[in-house]
Amino acid sequence: MSQDFFPDVQGRIPFGGIGSDDPLAFKVYQPDRFVLGKPMEDHLRIAVCCWHSFNWPGSDVFGMGTFDRPWLDPRLDPLIAARAKAEAAFEFFDKLGVPFFCFHDRDVAPEGRTFAESTTNLLTMVDELEAHMQRTGVRLLWGTANLFSHPRYAAGAATNPDPEVFAYAAAQVKTMLEVTHRLGGSSYVMWGGREGYETLLNTDLVREERQLARFLGLVAEHKRRIGFKGTLLIEPKPQEPTKHQYDYDAATVYGFLARHDLEGEYRVNLEANHATLAGHSFHHEVAQAVALGIFGSVDVNRGDYQNGWDTDQFPNSVDELSLAVYEILRAGGLTDGGFNFDAKLRRQSVDRTDLFHAHIGGMDTLARALLAAATMVEQGEIERLREQRYAGWAGDLGKSILAKDTLLELLAGRVATGEIDPSPRSGRQELLENLVNRAIWEVDSATDHGDTD
Ligand code: XLS
Ligand code: NI
Ligand code: NI
């Protein structure tokens, strides 16, 4: 089959520059443009996700699918449909020019009547994916198992009250981890969509925590057994579909890992809209994960400030993303992580070409954010002010406190004599915010002039 599923786009989406009025050209994203010593493409490691973009028909809780997706036609034989879906997806990746994709087992292959049949379907499709990957050069950023759609997982996977469900989920993750390894994935993601509760009245928190820790331990052990060198990632989310999810946010995940001796085994895959659902900014989640040493990868999207659910929209705010990208650059940049578009179209975006508009806009937003963040790093003023703010800790008093060379009594004595008498200093927040805006606006004028250094 070599159907042209996206006939409106012939060949690769070109770089048009900020002055271009071609809606199907990048305005800022230029994969080979050098930023802080490496190509933009390697900074951002952009991935397209298979679930929202290829496996979702545009349905919501009130209505059926709206999208024009011939590969999702329920009248097709499931494996023929899966093949067409893979063709469409790789045609899209290739035309868009992204280096990576991500998928769940069930996004690419239909669930069979038995576990064995599901696995056979998956492995059949993995052969196809492998061929597409070789043909196009598109690589796997991460793989994951869908442990939330099937009715068996209604009460959770690892945290299910029934150990048989735990075992079933374990079998599914084992298979998908091996598939990810075989396809050369950079990492493997665990999103515990239903690892939480609907009501505390039927929930044993102590047991469920122990089960989840055991599950994560088994996965880490299997990773070593098969020699998979990629990173295991936990994707925090506070709720939805459950009322409460155990992997609430980065700090909660870190506490859980530390409590269960799993530190060093897992990092986090942070999603922008999950941060806002947890009552944080995305900037906070990234900075917190970096501070805890568990930052791994990003699911990039945005929420709607008037809605309380995961609207998973494509990102379009350079102001917000610049701050998150700045934290990532400060931490040394992405290593095996990436920016995966875990984002979906609106239900009225029924044309197949809308998928291009969404990704082009998201990639340009990310690229602009990268340039702004790189300017902040290069100018160094924000870091200088941050360091200056803590300068006292490099002096004798600060050092002796941290070195545990002091006692409350000694400190109190020095304060009592008036030797220590602190005076308030400006936190300079407005100045810092102006520096951020200046970096963003500088990018504006640089791209206006077609400056490519
Ligand atoms: C859902 C999650 C999910 C994970 C992968 O909210 O973001 O899409 O990224 O299972
Ligand atoms: Ni996600
Ligand atoms: Ni999400």
Image (spheres, grey):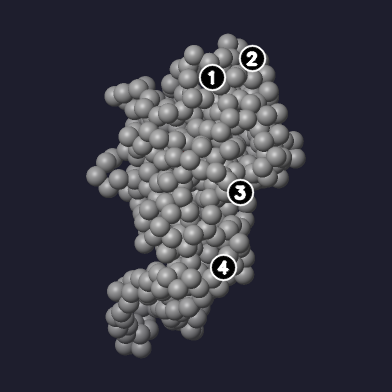
Residue 309 on image: x %, y %: 32, 38
Q: Is residue 184 above or below residue 104?
A: below
Q: Quadrant of the N terminus?
A: top right
Pointer 2 and pointer 4: residues touching (CB < 8 Å)? no
> Residue at label 3?
99
Q: Is residue 207 visible?
A: no
User: Does the beta carbon of the residue at mark 2 sit less than 8 Å from ligand 1?
Assistant: no
Instruction: Residue 117: give its label.
Output: 2
Residue 301 on image: x %, y %: 42, 47
Q: Is residue 363 above or below residue 226?
A: below
User: Does the beta carbon of the residue at mark 1 sit less than 8 Å from ligand 1?
Assistant: no
> Residue at label 1?
165
Q: Which comes sooner in the sequence, label 2 or label 4? A: 4
Residue sitting nearer the eye, 155 or 190:
190
Q: Which comes sooner in the sequence, label 4 or label 1? A: 4
Determine the residue positioned at 43% across, 54% down.
Answer: 22
Q: Which comes sooner in the sequence, label 3 or label 1? A: 3
For the residues marked 4 and 3, what is the alpha-carbon distance in whole angstroms?
17 Å
Looking at the image, residue 271 sits to the left or right of residue 190; the answer is left
For the residues marked 3 and 2, what is the alpha-carbon distance in whole angstroms?
31 Å
Q: Is residue 299 above or below residue 382?
A: above
- Kind of residue sitting beneath label 3: Pro
Residue 71 on image: x %, y %: 52, 25
Looking at the image, residue 182 sits to the left or right of residue 7; the answer is right
Quarter occupied by residue 125: top right
